[in-house]
Image (cartoon, rainbow, N blue to C red):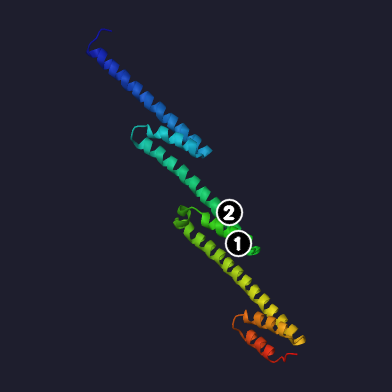
Amino acid sequence: MPDGQTKTELLNRLDAVQQAINAQVALDRATAAIDFAETAKTQSIINAARAKVNALPDGQAKNDLQARLDAIEQAIKDAKANSLLTDVTNAVVRAEKYPSRSNILTALNKLAALPTDIKANQVNRGNVADLQERADKLKNNFNQNVADQSAQLALNKATNAVKLFERFPKAIYKQRAIDAVNALPDTPEKTALQARIDAVTLK
């Protein structure tokens, strides 16, 4: 066909058709990539799909595909958050059932390791706060039990030292009893043991 207005118009129409075909192919490929991403749910595949979507011309179709991608990423984040919270919850429950130092530390460490966005999330905030309170209570109770046991051991040691001095009223045993009793905090039990030492006459 010789050059002219008719030829130019036909070429322009062909270009428009080709552009429309190319646009539809790009849209179809982006849609297929998102379909795959919705099944695979891995970040690398999501990134590849998003690159295809970003290359599309602005419009409702692009917006819809971007919304689907955002929903996939949010679902992945939610699943990760739920998995981490379940893990932390199980750790706290285990520590409550078996309150050993190791289990309590594990629960506290898992809580501390939770990402900030999960802790700050309005949906998770109350649950995380409850788990933290329960774990802190376990820690405080454990520390108090350790302190109570240490205090009881010290009291038993002092009591046995006083008994030994009462049985064998020698200076060496008196000093041992005094040292053991002086190591006790001020309590009625300490006062009573001091009185027992004072009541013994050295031989």
Q: Is residue 15 left or right of residue 126?
A: left
Residue lying at the far top in this picture: please name it.
2
Q: Quadrant of residue 108?
A: bottom right
Task: Tell me the SS state at disc 2.
Answer: helix
Whether residue 154 sits left or right of residue 136 in the image: it is right
Q: Earlier in the sequence, mark 1 or mark 2?
A: 2
Real-space CA distance between mark 1 and mark 2, rounded to the nearest whole angstrom: 14 Å
Depth check: give the residue in front, 128 or 37. 128
For image coordinates 53% across by 37% down, the residue present is 40
Q: Secondary structure at mark 1?
A: helix
> As shown in the figure, which amino acid type bears the numbered disc 2?
Asp
Q: Give the answer, above or below, for where 20 lies relative to 43.
A: above
Q: Name which residue lies at 52% across and 48% down.
A: 80
Q: Where, quadrant-wise, is the N terminus in this rendering?
A: top left
Mark 1 neighbour class, 10 Å CA radius: few under 14, some 14 to 19, many 20 or more:
many
Mark 1 or 2: in front is 1
Between residue 20 and residue 113, name the one nearer to us: 113
The tag on residue 17 is none
- Quadrant for residue 3, please give it: top left
Residue where numbered disc 1 is placed: 104
Residue 164 locus on image (x, y percent): 75, 83
At x 53% / y 52%, what residue is drawn?
82
Measuring 54% from the left and 62% from the top, which residue is drawn there?
Answer: 131
**Which sits in the foreground, 190 or 46?**
190
Q: How many marks?
A: 2
Mark 2 highlights which residue?
87
